[in-house]
Image (cartoon, rainbow, N blue to C red):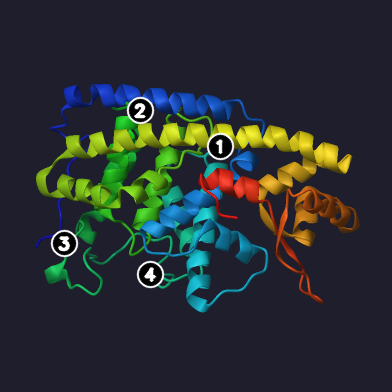
Amino acid sequence: MQAHEPAALPPSGIEIAQLVTLVGEANAALARYDGLLQGMVNPAVMLSPLTHQEAVLSSRIEGTQATVEEVLEHEAGREYDINKEADIQEILNYRKALTLAAETLTDRPLRLSLVKALHKELMNSVRGQDKEPGEFRKTQNWIGPHGCTIETASFIPPNPLQLMDHLQAWERYLESDDTDPLLQTAIVHAQFEILHPFKDGNGRIGRLLIPLFLYSKGRLSTPMFYLSAYLEAHRAEYYARLAAVTRENDWTGWSAFFLRAIAEQAKTNIARVQAILTLYETMKTRVREITRSQHSAQIVDALFDRPIFRIGDFATRAGIPKPTAHPLLRQLQDAGLLKQLREGSGRRPAILAFPELLNTAEGRKVL
């Protein structure tokens, strides 16, 4: 098998007529979702549970086995075995990369330099940190079953000698305006995965680029649209559609899959965000009524930012002195809003959780 020679961008042969309905549905669903984002005072806080979930699911596609609850409990001080800790650190790095990207794009365009910076953050101090974090590969890589050789690989990305030419063409395509921004997003993501420009972490960076590109094209008011839940649920088709691009030049089939993914995930996100918003408004009233505290708004924001926490960390995030925070949290615990996951013992602090938010964000009962 030879190294793949990627198509020039924009690729030829896409049957636009077959995609018109899907383009319209995806744009309409994404616009409704973004309308909700624009109505939020602080989407980064209120939707932080969705950011945690995206980091977990995108990493799960690559083989990690940690859950949102385990990540949050780890941050609250719970210790796991070495393999679980390694999975959790990869997820935390993905979340940091998401945050870095969102902050950077406010005053910096989406370019190869930013992609490299995100990769460096993603691979910091985790498995794969020896694979040149933040640097495009200078050697040939390949894709296939674990332990396969280049002779038995299912796909060989472009030759490293031509890689920078292809990446620069991809970067120029980012700057262009194609037929439709959502269709262009499908092409941007697929081409990045085909180029596979890093030694490791390509899938996660490629999925992270989806909301960043939509934001750069003005289709999102903030880069908080996460597609990994759909891609993880349809993993086999996701990989099969990408493979069909390289084997059969089937950009139409890939684009149709991607547009359906955007439409369906946007509808799911709308329902989830509406539920989180409703819970947020309800909690503002309930916490105020239970605590009668001038700090009630800060309490609610801190709970939504990290729904599993230690009291000391909570007090810091909420900007409340710890002696003040402790009785307030006890009131919320007595009222049934908070649940104790671990009792305090000696120097080891208790770990508390806000189950209603975790259950709402996951769409199922987790606590």
Q: What's the distance in space between the residues labelled 1 and 3, CA to CA?
A: 39 Å
Q: Which of the two residues, 223 or 254, is positioned nearer the viewer here?
A: 254
Q: Position of residue 21 (x, y in %)?
A: 26, 22
Q: What's the distance in space between the residues labelled 4 and 1, CA to CA?
A: 29 Å
Q: Which of the two residues, 189 or 87, is positioned nearer the viewer here?
A: 87
Q: Which mark is residue 154?
A: 3
Q: Amino acid at mark 1?
A: Thr
Q: Which residue is mark 4?
A: 131
Q: Amino acid at mark 2?
A: Ala
Q: Are marks 4 and 1 in contact (CB under 8 Å)?
A: no
Q: What's the distance in space between the residues labelled 2 and 4, CA to CA?
A: 37 Å
Q: Which residue is mark 2?
A: 26
Q: Is residue 344 left or right of residue 207?
A: right
Secondary structure under tag 3 reads loop
Secondary structure under tag 2 reads helix
Up the image or down, 111 lies above or below 326; here it is: above
Q: Amino acid at mark 3?
A: Ser
Instruction: Write down the quadrant of residue 73 in the picture.
Output: bottom right
Residue displayed at 25% across by 71% down: 146
Q: What's the distance in space between the residues labelled 4 and 3, CA to CA?
A: 21 Å
Q: Position of residue 328 (x, y in %)?
A: 85, 50
Secondary structure under tag 4 reads loop
Q: Which of the two residues, 292 or 147, is positioned nearer the viewer here?
A: 292
Mark 4 or mark 1: whose residue is earlier in sequence: 1
Instruction: Write down the quadrant of residue 197 in the picture.
Output: bottom left
Q: Which residue is mark 1?
A: 106
Instruction: Write down the quadrant of residue 131 in the picture.
Output: bottom left
Residue displayed at 22% across by 68% down: 145
For label 1, the crowd category at 10 Å Cα-Cα, with few meaning under 14, some 14 to 19 and many 20 or more, is few
Mark 2 or mark 1: whose residue is earlier in sequence: 2
